[in-house]
Image (cartoon, rainbow, N blue to C red):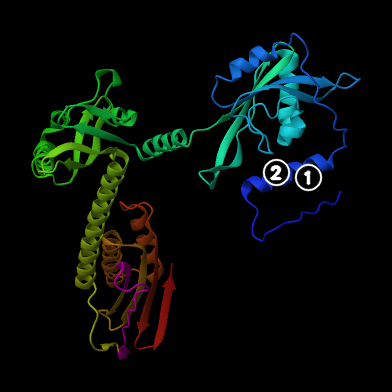
Amino acid sequence: VSIGVLRGRPGRFSPRTREHLRAVVRLCAGRLRAFEARPEPAAGSGADTVQAVLDTLPGAAVLLTPLRAPTGEIEDYRIDAASPESVDVLGRGGAGPVGLRIRECWPPVADEALWQGCAHTLATGEPYEGDPYGQRDEVAGAAQLSTYRVRVTRLGEGLIAGWVRHDPSAQQERRLEDVQRLGNLGWANWNLVTQEVTWSAQVFTVLGRDPGRGPLRLDDLPGLTLPDDVPALSRALDDLLEAGLPADAPFRIRTENGVRHLRLVAEAVTDLRGTPVEVHGFLQDLTAQRRAELALVASERAMLTQHGALRAERALAGRLQHTLLPLPDKPLRLAGLRVEVAYLPAQAGVQVGGDWFSAIELPDGDALLVVGDVAGHGVGAVATMAQLRFTAKGMVITGSSLTGALGRLNTLLLHSRDSHGTATLVLARYHARERRLEWAQA
């Protein structure tokens, strides 16, 4: 089917015109029917009675009588009564659609889900409610998107179909409830003249108060507060009620579930003389955020304490290492040798290690050269280093061989307090008279 539109003026189609054109296209796309005279409602159907009822009801509703094919299948519905607010896609309202078929007046009703729902209701008597759908309406000359839902119930051998339009104010109220729930806050209003207090349901949740006990007056809030927070909250309320200054006051209350951290934000409405006559604001539960902040502060304090302890330990280990192993500022002269010493830690200034050296002249004129390293860092490694350093020199000076000294040092390390400690060590003895170097490692 090819459809052309002849227009008398340029410009965009209005939403209402576009909806009419869509309806025309849907009608032309189907099998053409003969336009006969409108069929009259069946005698005794009660259509007049239903029409009288629909005339008194708000909203859009129609009485539908099924039209069946020879096979018994429902091919359409006839509109036998319509409420005054029922307007079809061509703009016909009230009694305009009566006597016509539903496909002619509201082609969208032929949607598969809705059509099947109507058939199910007609067969079983169970009411049907369709999914919400959006439709553009023209209100005060402006187009706006409205949300509708179709409800269908059986009436005798026919159906009553109604279009329920969701009130935008109700949607906004539900959204406001969602915002209060997600933000864990609720609004409150205190009339200082009539003493009337109005709370949203979420305020009772925030305060842990039974709604059956009703809301509290503004000056009763300090009575719920922990003693340490009463002075600050009372000052904020005095400034609000006496001077009309906005209030933003944190305070704590004790409930069955423990202490809650709350926040009151409020402002006053004054009369012509500047006297506060009404207060509105909100109460927010900040317990989760406050607990997270306190946990973060505790974690930072623990990290600072640990950092200080590590820094003190590093400084102590550094002093011990320097005391036990001073680095010479000039070459050493031993048994005719010149010994140069260089020390370069892998990570300067981070941790003190257990590496060491010794270079001494033995009583018989030979030179003893030692290079060692204890696994690990810190005070423990420095202590083990000192133990091995002095013990190794003592053993060789008292006559132990290099391999014998290493064996005894291994036994010493195995029986030390640090059962997991390990070390590497190179012992070298330079025989000056023979100009021979003897060395061993373990």
Q: Which residues are magenta?
A: 336-356
Find out whether residue 344 is within the magenta segment.
yes
The amino acid sitting under disc 1 is: Val
Disc 2, SS: helix
Q: Main secondary structure of the magenta part?
A: loop
Give the x, y percent position of residue 381: 31, 62
- Locate residue 71 relative to residue 270 in the image: left or right: right
In the depicted view, which residue is nearer to us: 383 or 30? 30
Write down the quadrant of residue 329 in the picture.
bottom left
Outermost residue, right direction?
70
The amino acid sitting under disc 2 is: His
Q: Which mark is residue 372?
A: none
Q: Residue 265, relative to residue 351: is it above or below?
A: above
Residue at 68%, 44% in the rendered image: 19
Label count reads 2
Disc 1, SS: helix
Query: Which label's residue is closer to the chain start, 1 or 2?
Result: 2
Q: Which mark is residue 25?
A: 1
- Locate residue 409 relative to residue 69 in the image: left or right: left
Q: Is residue 122 visible?
A: yes
